[in-house]
Amino acid sequence: MESYRPPRLDREDAICPYCRAQGSLTNFPLYQRSPENVTPFPLNRMAAPRHPYLPLTQRLPDGRTTVFSASRCVECSRLLLWGNETLLFPPFSVRPLALGALRTMYASEVAQIEHAQLIMDLAPAAAAVMLRHVLLALCAPLGYSPQSNASYVVFLDGKLRGEIGKHSCETQRTLLKRGCVRNDVPLEPDTYDAHDDAQTVIALLKLIEYIAQTYFSGA
Ligand SMILES: [Zn+2]
């Protein structure tokens, strides 16, 4: 499994965080008006005898300088803001998830997954709640009955125990530590746990992707 990797300006194959197109970002610099020269920037750039604007920058307390730039996605026309090579807006991206038939069978849950991805950097605990709801929804077609004594967390744990072991140690540790699949610390979907962080969200996303590929890969 790949680790969390936001797009970077210096990567030509960066994925658009809005529409997931790859290599679709067109970059352009941003300028601020020079305080010494307030000549309006001409609409016809070729006619400008001398550039009246300065690159848009911000000097940090440690002396480094951030140079801002923007990108537009040629596929979806939406804008991204960069500080040096780092994505500033929108607030996050993860690689597109391979959700197979879930995309058509569980459109509402897929929408929740994508919303959770969008907010995971700003509100990881809220994103985790959304993803636990998705996990619960996916348990029914796997054979889980709400009437059974076990919680869906216990059910998932039994269903996936062997498979969870195949994940990277980091993912395993996060899932177990956060009680995502462990029966002695069951977290029900409505539980808001302020300790859930981005790593928890990533672990939940990986688990959902694994379930999608294992149980929902066909049409
Ligand atoms: Zn796009």
Image: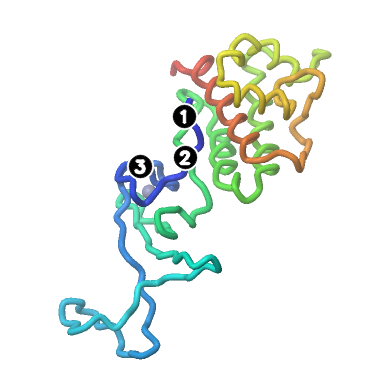
Mark sitting earlier along the chain (3/2): 2
**Which mark is drawn over residue 178?**
none
> Mark 3 = which residue?
21
Where is residue 4? Give x, y as percent: 51, 37
Kind of residue sitting beneath label 1? Glu
User: In which quadrant of the rendered image does the C terminus lie?
Assistant: top left
Are the two marked residues, 1 and 3, in contact with CB atoms closer than 8 angstroms?
no
Query: Going 48% across and 70% down the picture, which residue do you hit?
Result: 59
Q: Are marks 1 and 2 in contact (CB under 8 Å)?
A: yes
The percent coordinates of residue 130 (x first, y second) are 66, 38
> Which residue has dot 2 on it?
5
Residue drawn at point x = 51 percent, y = 18 percent:
216
Residue holding disc 1: 2
Respond yes or no on whether mark 1 lies under 8 Å from ligand 1: no
Q: Is residue 77 above or below residue 6?
A: below
Q: Give me the C-alpha separation between circle 3 and circle 2.
A: 15 Å
Q: Residue at x 36, y 90 (%)?
A: 36
SS at circle 2:
loop
**Mark 3 Cβ and ligand 1 under 8 Å apart:** yes
Examine the rendered structure and indicate whether residue 90 appears above or below residue 170. Answer: below
